[in-house]
Image (cartoon, rainbow, N blue to C red):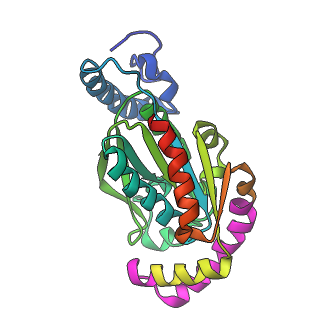
Amino acid sequence: MTGGKKCSAGLSCGPLMLACTCSTPYNCRVNCSLIAEAYSEYQAFDCMTDKPHQCVIIGIAGASASGKSLIASTLYRELCYQVGDEHIGIISEGSYYKDQSGMTMTERVKTNYDHPSAMDHSLLFQYIQMLKAGLPIEMPVYSYVEHTRRPETLHLRPKKVIILEEILLLTDLRLRQEMNLSIFVDTPLDICLMRRMKRDVNERGRSMDSVIGEYQRTVRPMFLQFIEPSKQYADIIVPRGGKNRIAIDILKAKISQFFE
């Protein structure tokens, strides 16, 4: 690895020093060792191609159950068919909820998951920088049933285009500055609530009362305080959610330009 600047653990992070956000030598030793391992893989991959490593970041935000995940998955699936899955990837901000393995289940369920503080945006930002530097990442896997990260990770290699999606992406200045295109899915809250109730009861093992209670306590207030105001930062606003076929076609045409 290239020498140069050293992080707080004394490791030579070289060109990856920009990705080191660790506050203590111990954490830095663990995290930057993973970065160093990823960089070794990058060097092996890099020797096989002379093409510059460029990664385009597309951010899709909106209220919970607004249809943003449907838009993201539709774009991913159709663009994969068009350019191949080796050139496009998708990351959910929900994978970057903070690890709560050291908390009891009673403590975990009290977390306000619609507040920006519930997200590990620093780790997501670090991993975006790694992808832009041509490095693979190990994405966390979050369990919505256990309310914490699972022990396994998902390996993601650099792609030409990465689609980010979830509720709070546009609330973080660092993430916005990394995006080449930002999208806000604008769906009426009553429709979002009905979709959320169906999803959380059927897919996440929640009771109807708990879903409605959470909506009243945190989901709606946090939407009004954080998510809706972040709409001002979007380049494109999509009405009517994930079944807006005209909007999806327009977005697909725009994203396709990044592959040219």
Q: Look at the picture and state if 145 lies above or below 231.
A: below
- Which is more toward the observer, 24 or 220? 220
Q: Is residue 216 visible?
A: no
Q: In the visual, does 30 lie left or right of 248?
A: left
Q: In the visual, does 156 lie left or right of 93?
A: left
Identify the image quadrant of the N terminus. top left
Identify the image quadrant of the C terminus. top left
| Magenta region, main secondary structure | helix
Q: Does the segment drawn in magenta span residue 202?
A: yes
Q: Look at the picture and state if 246 lies above or below 20.
A: below
Q: Residue at x 74, y 67 (%)?
A: 224
Q: In the visual, does 162 lie left or right of 178?
A: left
Q: Residue at x 61, y 56 (%)?
A: 168
Question: Image quarter for residue 122?
Answer: top right
Q: Residue at x 40, y 83 (%)?
A: 202
- Residue 236 placed where, x, y %? 66, 53
Q: Does the segment drawn in magenta span residue 44?
A: no
Question: Image quarter for residue 191?
Answer: bottom right
| Magenta range | 200-228
- Residue 113 placed where, x, y %? 56, 65
- How many numbered callouts? 0
Q: Is residue 93 visible?
A: yes
- Which is more toward the observer, 44 or 235? 235
Question: Image quarter for residue 211?
Answer: bottom right
- Residue 45 placed where, x, y %? 26, 25
Q: Look at the picture and state if 26 lies above or below 185.
A: above
- Residue 210 placed where, x, y %? 53, 85
